[in-house]
Structures are given as structure tokens and as C-alpha cells.
Amino acid sequence: MKTMSKLNRASGALVAVAAIVLLAAGSAGAQARIDGIVGQTSFNFTAKAGEVSTPDGGSIHFWGYQDDDGRETLPGGILPQYPGPTMILNQGDAVTITFTSELPFGQCSSMVFPGLAVEATGGSAGALTQETCPGDLTPVTYTFTASEPGTYMYYSGTDSGLQVEMGLVGALIVRPSMGEGYAYNSVETAFDHEVLFLLTSMDPRVHQLAEQNRFAEIDLTARKAVYWFINGRAAPDDLAEPFVGWLPHQPYNCGPRITPEENILVRIIGGDQDQHPLHLHGNHYYEIARYGRMLSSNGSDPDLKRGKVTTLSVPGQTVDALFDWTGEKMGWDIYGSTLDGMPAHNCIDNDNDGYADAGSDYPMEWCADHNKPFPVVLPEKQNLAFGGWWSGSPYMGGSGTLPPGEGGLNPNGGFFFMWHSHTEKELTNYDIFPGGMLSMMVIEPPGTVID
């Protein structure tokens, strides 16, 4: 793993990237940011019903939070979302959320915000907070100050077991006073890009009974999920661009990308009643915060951070983690050596930390592997099966001849790693593999602009 002093911002010409691995344009130049409602402190939400689409052609009745102000451009207009709109706030913001319920069959609902000190007014008293019912003359108003930076979630505080299963859950992010590009008020939490992993699942039998007003027949102790989602989409839909017309209620995608010069902040939210072991292939990463609080003994830096390869995401928990990738100790030159027929390049390490310094052809290259040839002979093409992400070359930034109609999803010659739940059944869509709680991390060549 590289040290924070080695983190650099990527530069270079904008390159075309296949749509299936594009992230949405971020809010700060070329830095990829999480999609959501930015720069607002007043929200008007309504709980309504809609239909979630699944990659196997299914459609599941769901309940979701709708932004009545329509500040995200959903393809179908102002609609309930799964998950609910991601609210992206700044530390110190005074926030007001006005909430009404238009759920079917007179179902009341509410919103709770763990980790935030919230005052609720209006509506009627519920089990956890003030709630609102269809036909109420006055909505519920929730107010709070976003006093602490971090990753949070919100969900229904009314019959939470059922209503969270039905889809009433969302993410809330508070950016620190240090500004965008930091997870918390510490230089050691700096990041180049960020990605959200809001993990949920569904048992369509529960949703069918709710759609038919057969609530008395719902037994959540017998719930058995058969669909698993990242940010409201099951794979491979989560790799498609955000805000596509064929997923009108599911605007958010999940396609993390970095270069070896960069790092990424991974925000993980356990958004249902199950545990999900999220496994990030390619390197160890470091958890720097949990439940919106930095893992710190001194309050100023994440000195209690935890090195991991898998995070067990549990219901209601949020985790912030920093991931980077260098190709360190691969045992061969990831950019290809002259013995492999690739162009010559230098690797200058004046500070003797093992990594190429700025000014090298490929900053952050692991110099001990410089010019080491690829350790195996690749089979002839007639003996290969070609995946869509194979560029035709094993080298970072490399490409090669491919048969007609093969490849095309990796124009930059990046390295792909599957990021997924380590509970194998969660990699299916109603028993069809691959699918479910699965995404792809792409390590792009140095200089690639990621937006």
C-alpha cells in the first residue's frame, strides 16, 4: 500500500470509456463523486409505491422515498426511488425534511436518522418518531444540524422490518468542514474518488402480499431473499450508467474506477436485515470510520484504522474505507518490459520507498518489478475464451488483436477486479448467476481522467 504522501491527482487527456463502466460526472472537476442531491438543506419527500426492475426480467412492487422537488433528473419524471434520494450535506448545515405518506392501503410511515440529533414535529406519535398517514392534513417535519461529517443512512421508523424490506431506506452523507476531497476533518482521510455501496435485498413474496393488501399473511421470520442489490440495482444493471430510462425508479449505479496514482473512498451501508460480507479484491484497504465516526483515539486522525480484505456489513452500520492499488510485488512489470515487446519506460526511486517518484514514466510503479518479463506464455487465440473486458493484452494500458465482435468494454487497457458479497448465493438473481451484489473495480492506466 502506498503512503498518503504519495497520493497524486491524475492528469491527462479525456479518454472514451465504455458506458458499462462509467461513473456519473462528479461535482468537482474530474473527481468522481457519489450521485445525489447536492447543495440543498430543505427537502420535501413523499413515500409512494413503484416497481423495481431486476436483470432477469422481473418486476417487484416496492415503496420508496420520492423527492417532490425533482432535483434529480429521473427518466420517468418525479418518482419514488430505490433506494431513496442520497442527501449530500455539508458539516454545519441546518436541515429540514418535510415528509408525507401516500403509501397504498392507508399505510403510515416516518423517517429516522441514526447518528443525528433530530427533532420531529407534526403528524402523530409513532413507535420511534412522529409519523404521517395518507390523508393527514399536516405532514411531519424533521429538523437537525449536520454537526458531524460521515456516512449515515435513513429509513422508515414505522413497522421498520416491513417498510425497510419494501424499500424505504436511503443514504445521507455529510462532508467535513475541511471541504470536498476529505472524508473527515483529517488530511489522512483525503481521497481522489468515492463510491457508495448501499447493500439491500428483497423477498418478492413479501412484496406481492403487500401489493395485494394481505399484510396479515406476511411473516418476516420466514423471509428469504432471492434478490440482492447495490445502490438499488442487481448486477449487471449496477454497472450501467446512472439515470437510464429502463430503470426509472433505480437511478444509482456502482462502477468504481481509479488509477494507480489515486485512491477511492468506499462508503458501505448495511441497508437491510441481513449481513453481507463485502469483499474488495485487488489489495488490502483500510477502514477509517464506522457509524459516521472516525476510528480515532485522539480525535484528529484515523490512528485506529483497520486493514481489511472483507468488511462484514451488518444491518444499520455504515463503514468508510480507503482503497488504493499499485501492482506492488506482482513479480512482473505490469506495464510490460522490452522483453515482452512493450515500449521501454523508466522507474526512478530517489527516496527509496520502493515506488517510482513523480517524473517517472509511470509514477507509483513498484520499481523492484521494473523490466521483469511476464512469467507465462499466453495461449494462442484459438485456445482462448474472450471476456468483454479483455483488452487483448495482460499489461496496464496495453491492447492487442481480438477476434471480430470480441471485447470492447476495456478501451484503456485497465485491470478489472470483482467487488462482491462473499456470500455466494448473493451473486445471483433468483438463482441465476452472475448477478446480485456484484460490481467491478477498474484500475485504469496512469493519466486516465475519471469523471
Image (cartoon, rainbow, N blue to C red):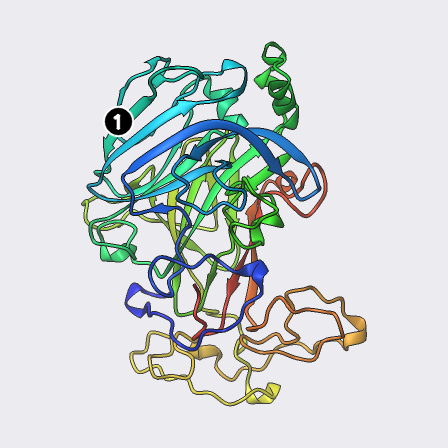
In this rendering, the answer to whether 421 lies above or below 272 is below
The quadrant of the rendering that contains the C terminus is: bottom left
Q: Nearest the camera: 246 or 205? A: 246
Task: Count every numbered label the image shows and give the total.
Answer: 1
Is residue 112 at least partly visible in the picture? no
Quadrant of the rendered structure where residue 189 is? bottom left
The quadrant of the rendering that contains the N terminus is: bottom left
Say which residue appears at 58% left-offset and 59% top-offset: 20
Q: Amino acid at mark 1?
A: Val
Could you say whether the residue bearing mark 1 is in a helix, strand or loop? loop
Image location of residue 181, percent across then percent down? 30, 57
Q: Nearest the camera: 422 or 147? A: 147
Side (left or right) of 239 relative to 385: left
In this rendering, the answer to whether 222 lies above or below 380 is above
Query: Callout 1: 10 Å neighbours few (<14), some, many (20+)?
Result: some
Side (left or right) of 235 relative to 378: left
Image location of residue 428, percent across then percent down? 67, 42
Q: Nearest the camera: 225 or 100? A: 100
List the residue tagged with mark 1.
Answer: 118
Quadrant of the rendered structure where residue 110 is? top left
Image location of residue 71, percent across then percent down? 39, 44
Is residue 280 at least partly visible in the picture? yes
In this rendering, the answer to whether 218 lies above or below 306 is above
Say which residue appears at 72% left-offset and 76% top-offset: 402
Say which residue appears at 54% left-offset and 39% top-offset: 249
Say which residue appears at 42% left-offset and 84% top-offset: 361
